[in-house]
Amino acid sequence: MTGQLSIYASRLAIQSQQGPDFIDLTDFLEKQLRQCNIGEGHVLVFSRHTTACVVIQENEPLLLEDLRRKLHEIASPEEKFLHDDFGIRTENLGDTEDVNGYAHCQGLFLSQSVQVPIHDGKLALGRWQRVFFVELDCPRGREVIAQFVGVSA
């Protein structure tokens, strides 16, 4: 390893189209990595939302459809959730609230972040691995933070 430790942060604004949806962030992360010139280290990719997550998965359309179906089986928008009963809910209420208890429950099985090693100036992902932002709720503006930490190439 050469150089001193550096930290770079990027923010990516996302406009989701549906839930659940898988939005591939890998090309964005690779571009950001080239710009910050880190040779060895890691990147933390973080969703700033409780109903949107970040995962590593294969970008294969039939698999992504299987994953959508499985998320629906875990927690369906058709189910009743106490979180969605605004007659009894008193915490964390904003001016506009969505009926999204299902998205929170789906998110319990995923994660708000992933960490990917950087080796030889590249994301050390496996052959089929891609980094995805996963929208679990309705279409809306979202934000992902990518924090790159490492030493120069």
Image: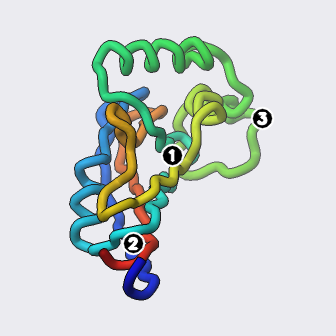
Structural distance between the alpha carbons of marks 1 and 2: 30 Å
Q: Which residue is mark 2?
A: 9
Amino acid beneath label 3: Ile
What residue do we see at 32% from left, 38% from top? 23
Give the structural element (helix, strand or loop) at label 1: loop
SS at mark 3 in the image: loop
Residue reaching furthest to the bottom: 4
| Comes first in the chain, label 3 or label 2 | 2
Viewport quadrant of the N terminus? bottom left
Judge by depth and name the residue closer to the eye, 137 or 47.
47
Question: In the rendering, which numbered label is found on residue 151?
Answer: none
The x and y percentages for residue 137 are: 47, 33
Farthest residue toward the front? Answer: 1
The spot of residue 8 in percent (x, y) is: 38, 76
- Image x and y of residue 9, in percent: 39, 72
Q: In this orientation, which residue lies closer to the viewer: 66 or 85?
A: 66
Q: Are marks 1 and 2 in contact (CB under 8 Å)?
A: no
Q: Give the residue type at disc 2.
A: Ala
Mark on residue 88? 3
Question: How many angstroms separate mark 1 from mark 3 (CA)?
Answer: 16 Å
In the image: residue 93, left or right of residue 133: right
Which one is earlier in the sequence, the residue at label 1 or at label 2?
2
* Circles 1 and 3: CB atoms closer than 8 Å: no
Residue that label 1 marks: 96
